[in-house]
Amino acid sequence: MYNFKGISAEAIGLLSLNAFNDSKEFYEQHKEELKQNITVPMRQIVLDLSDIMCEIDPLTDTNPVYAVSRIRRDTRRTKNKRLYRDNLWLFLRRNKFAYPFAPFYWFEFTQQNYAFGLGMWTERQTQFDFVREKILAEQDRWFEAIEATKSAGLTYNTRDFYKKDKIPNAPERLKPYLNAKNVEFFYVGNDLGRLADPSLIDELRLMLDISSPMYKFLIEAYDKAFSEGMINANYYRR
């Protein structure tokens, strides 16, 4: 039995209404309802995925409070001063303060759809070079990992590329990956009714299991960059 019992259409509607009102008074009136029907179920998803995620990476931070976004937005560093969001997401990753820019899995829902996937972003080009080096050194393993993401229902969705080839003499089939500034694989589902069904956890657990060769490939490249000092563990404490 899973902890997650579903997120209802009514709960998603209330989240949208709260964002539309953008009022502290409205939020305080419905705070507990939003917590129990939106935030708590998202945290339950984290709990229900924590065992398989820790098998993939024992260093995963499975604290559900840490992993799930807040309904109240942090508006200190953004021009958008709206107080409340109408979507929520969660990350399955290592602690971001101890391991900034580590690969991650994510799940999100909006008012229109839900999505999940696997990605890795870095602050500087030199940090992502470790992924490129590993792709070149282990080409067969890389393409096996690509096939694993496809089998998990994920699509390669990286959209930010360098204009010039990073490695001009590399095999052509590698260039869509070597020229990328980051890497992302994801799935979008348009049936929000899936969020009301606890079997959503089965879908997510299967995705984690099947796509894990890609995560392991990326985390090995990350660990090398980290061990060589190319990634600063104090990034978020600046």
Image (cartoon, grey):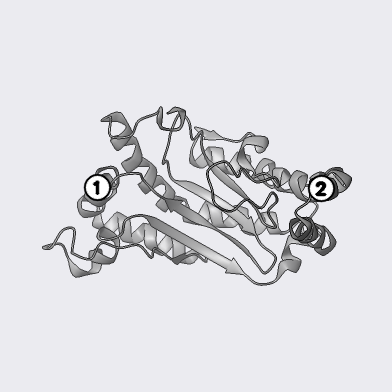
- Where in the figure is residue 192, as x and y percent of width and height? 72, 67
Q: Secondary structure at mark 1?
A: helix
Residue furthest to the bottom = 190
Amino acid type at circle 1 is Asp
Write the residue at 88% across / 46% down. Answer: 29
Relative to 174, is 196 on the left or the right?
right
Q: Which residue lies at the image location 79% right of the left edge and 46% below the top edge?
A: 24
**Residue topped by disc 2:** 27
85 displayed left or right of 177 = right
Element class at badge 2: helix
Dot 1 alpha-carbon crowd within 10 angstroms: few under 14, some 14 to 19, many 20 or more: some
> Dot 1 corresponds to which residue?
129
Q: Position of residue 204 (x, y in %)?
A: 62, 55
Q: Please name the amino acid that badge 2 sits on.
A: Tyr
Q: Decide which of tag 1 and tag 2 comes sooner along the chain.
A: 2
- Residue 118 makes an appearance in the image: yes
User: Residue 45: which disc?
Assistant: none
Residue 196 place in picture, x, y as percent: 78, 61
